[in-house]
Amino acid sequence: MTEAKKTPLYETHLKYGGKIVEFGGWLLPVQYTGILEEHRAVREKAGLFDVSHMGEVLVKGVDALAFLQNLVTNDVSRLTEHKIQYTPMCYKDGGVVDDLLIYKQGEEEYLLVINAANIEKDWQWMQENKGKFCIELTNLSDTTAQLALQGPLAQSILSELTDTNLEELEYYWFLPRVIVAGKETLVSRTGYTGEDGFEIYCRSEDAVALWDEIMTVGKPYGLLPAGLGCRDTLRFEACLPLYGHELSKDISPLEAGIGMFVKLDKGEFNGQAALAEQKKNGVKRKIAGFAVTGRGIARAEYPVMAEGRRIGTVTTGTYAPTLDKNLGLALVEAEFTKVGQEFAIEIRGKNVAAEVISKPFYKREGK
Amino acid sequence: MNIPAELKYSRDHEWVKIEGNHATIGITDYAQSQLGDVVFVEVPEVDTEITVGTGFSVVESVKAVSDIYAPVGGKIVEVNDALTDAPEIMNEDPYGEGWLAVVELTDPADLDDLLSSTEYEKFITEEGN
């Protein structure tokens, strides 16, 4: 293993009392004041996350669209300028290389935002798929920082630092060259928490000043710095998949329940044949949401049991703070995934009762 | 960090309060702060025999599952059932309302291996380094 990397905000996290852990090769705060308090702040007010570990790759050239259409499962041709699309990126066998966001910056220019732990693997995969496409790939990960300001008060807070009218920026759209606290940034109305909010991309050297400015103006609104711990509980309640858990090289988008981001009829792409086959015959396993009805907390990797045998594996499980219940996501045989289905989670050698519930566990009101 | 002088401590971050041949056990202020928000406690059952150094309870925070190791051996005579519905009292009052169990000691010599408050303070300082 190479040494864990630090984001430009590492020292800032220490200053704000962050408890540092290693995640995907990065040293990041798991929490500042406490996961539950930070989780609540994001649901009710706002939280500020350092997500500078995320990777950014720029795709430029006359074949940019054709290259991406082959690379990912969603239909990139539907994007208009300044719109964003979520998509899985698959292997030929339908397993997932990564899931990412595509920002259309221009007719021949797209920004891809990829998972931190997958940057090198994705970069390699994109190079292999470059083929005869006339494009230029640039890895911007090391020079780009990213802050996520999330929560119902995010717009009010960010509006204090910019003249740009954020009210007009709709969900899954972005604006380039937005001046925030005197720094040039790219602002998108996106996030990974199930709340309204923004992701703010900036140059690495501007990250500390931006963080401090946002924290300062956000204080009267109840803004808290938020760590990876609540990022996980927040995305989990909203049932947003996490690569390495609900998605992997061994779990296809159809199995993960995100088939709406697979456009089989858009033309040829990596994994198309395998995914078309899965769609035609139905998947054998699916990600199901469940509530632990007995006493205990399900955790990733715990076995799911029914009819005296193992029928699956928990992919994420924890205490869900907003719902005050012990919930989980599990990859189980498809016949056991109907809402109301009962099965058991094996927790420390004991079978604890659980029941399939509908997803997402949490959905915000309004837009 | 709160480390009451009248208690004994294990290297696994439990505290022990001795009254005759009974020992009340809980986790230390340091342990609860390291764990973060406690959201589940697997409260042990009364009459269970426990031996020094073996896991007899499980405490879970949002992120982590942690075994609680017996600081002394003996029979559990009382448990704190309040932790079942309100695990957060382990964070709020680790040396008081957040106690875990009372054990009837098998061998009082177990106590000799425990640390005093000053020794424990030194221990966590070194561990923290």
Image: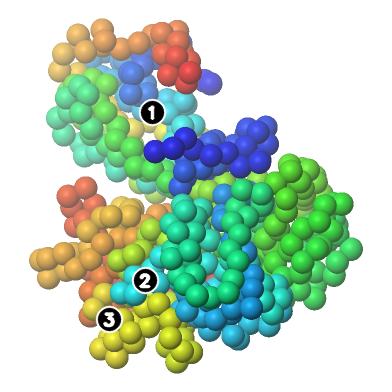
Residue found 38% across the figure and 28% down from its top: B27
How is the model colour-coded?
rainbow
Evaluate whether residue A40 shows in this view.
Answer: no
Image location (x, y in percent) of residue A303: 22, 59
* Closest to the observer, A3 or A306: A3
Q: CA distance from mark 2 to mark 3?
A: 17 Å
- In this view, the mark in front (1 or 3): 3
Residue tagged 2: A91
Task: Reply above or below: A41 against B7.
Answer: below
The disc at residue A147 is none
In the rendered image, the vertical position of residue A93 relative to residue A227, given as above or below:
below
Left or right: B116, with A119 as reference point? left
Which residue is disc 1 drawn over?
B27
Residue drawn at x 87%, y 52% as measured from the top left: A182
Spatial CA distance of label 1 from label 3 is: 47 Å
Which corner quadrant holds the N terminus of chain A?
A: top left
Q: Amino acid at mark 2?
A: Tyr
